């Protein structure tokens, strides 16, 4: 079965608080994005990789790859939103690609993704057309009302969503043809807003953190070197 991996790394990382987007910050001897690319390539070695980057950082990424002796996967220009970036990558896949091909969409800021988790996503996608890795929420939760007051919220009713998320190519293309709304925070939300059935949920990993703040670099470094 044909497989594609889209690694989204076009964000500017405003919350990270650095002049350099988080995906290009160094994690050990490699940038965060390179760790994510290598991990996904090892997990699904027969997949075609596509990396989505902001054009302003394309040359920086290619120089980083050259310095590391690393061959970059095919690059696609990012858009103003994550939605547009993923759509650009989908549009770059040949129209002749098999309709039942599998597409995995992964955040370039998740460098510690593990092979067994990725394979769970692939297997569930083959069986269900869409699959999302999730982890339990361990903190207590409160729901904030419009007036600023809050009430407890049952954490057993929610899970944390991770990537890679897996989808059948033809259906994902169709989902991304319906246009963007602000509630589309990930590919699974695009999928369901388009009227497609809820993705299967598979076991994620607490190690699969998303780099958001500078301290997350140190945490990821500990996980990688365990």
Image (tube, rainbow, N blue to C red):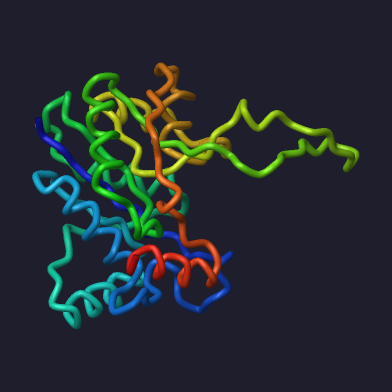
Can residue 55 be seen?
no
Relative to 23, say whether 89 is above or below: above
Which of 221 and 167 lies nearest the eye of the viewer?
Answer: 221
In the image: residue 12, left or right of residue 166: right
Location of residue 165 by image quarter: top left
Residue 129, position as x, y percentages in the image: 28, 22
Numbered label tally: 0
Residue 29 is situated, as x and y percent measured from the top left of the image, at: 29, 79
Determine the residue positioned at 28% across, 26% down: 124
**Residue 179, quarter of the rendered image:** top left
Q: Is residue 143 above or below residue 29?
A: above
96 and 48: which one is in front?
Answer: 48
Q: Quadrant of the N terminus?
A: top left
Q: Position of residue 110 (x, y in %)?
A: 39, 56
Q: Is residue 27 left or right of residue 142?
A: left
| Residue occupying the point 48% across, 31% down | 189
Quick one: which residue is furthest to the bottom in this view?
67
Along the viewing direction, whichever of 106 and 20 lies nearer the viewer: 106
Q: Quadrant of residue 226?
A: bottom left
Name, please, the residue furthest toward the front: 226
Can the viewer see residue 137 in this picture? yes
Q: Give the x, y percent position of residue 45.
A: 11, 48
At 37% from the left and 27% from the top, the residue drawn is: 175
Identified at 41% across, 68% down, the residue is 222
From the viewer's perspective, is 74 left or right of 203?
Answer: left
């Amino acid at each position: 079965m044909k497989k594609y991996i889209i690694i989204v790394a076009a964000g500017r990382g405003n919350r990270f608080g650095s002049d350099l987007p988080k995906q290009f910050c160094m994690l050990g001897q490699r940038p965060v994005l390179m760790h994510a690319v290598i991990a996904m390539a090892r997990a699904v070695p027969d997949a075609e990789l596509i990396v989505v980057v902001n054009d302003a950082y394309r040359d920086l990424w290619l120089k980083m790859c050259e310095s590391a002796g690393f061959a970059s996967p095919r690059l696609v220009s990012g858009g103003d939103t994550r939605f547009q970036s993923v759509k650009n990558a989908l549009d770059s896949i040949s129209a002749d690609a098999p309709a039942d091909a599998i597409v995995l969409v992964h955040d370039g800021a998740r460098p510690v993704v593990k092979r067994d988790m990725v394979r769970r996503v692939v297997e569930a996608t083959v069986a269900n057309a869409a699959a999302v890795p999730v982890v339990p929420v361990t903190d207590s939760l409160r729901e904030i009302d419009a007036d600023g007051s809050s009430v407890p919220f049952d954490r057993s009713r929610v899970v944390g969503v991770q990537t890679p998320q897996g989808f059948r190519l033809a259906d994902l293309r169709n989902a991304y043809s319906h246009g963007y709304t602000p509630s589309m925070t990930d590919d699974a939300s695009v999928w369901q807003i388009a009227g497609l059935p809820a993705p299967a949920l598979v076991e994620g990993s607490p190690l699969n953190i998303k780099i958001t703040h500078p301290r997350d670099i140190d945490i990821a470094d500990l996980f990688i070197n365990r």
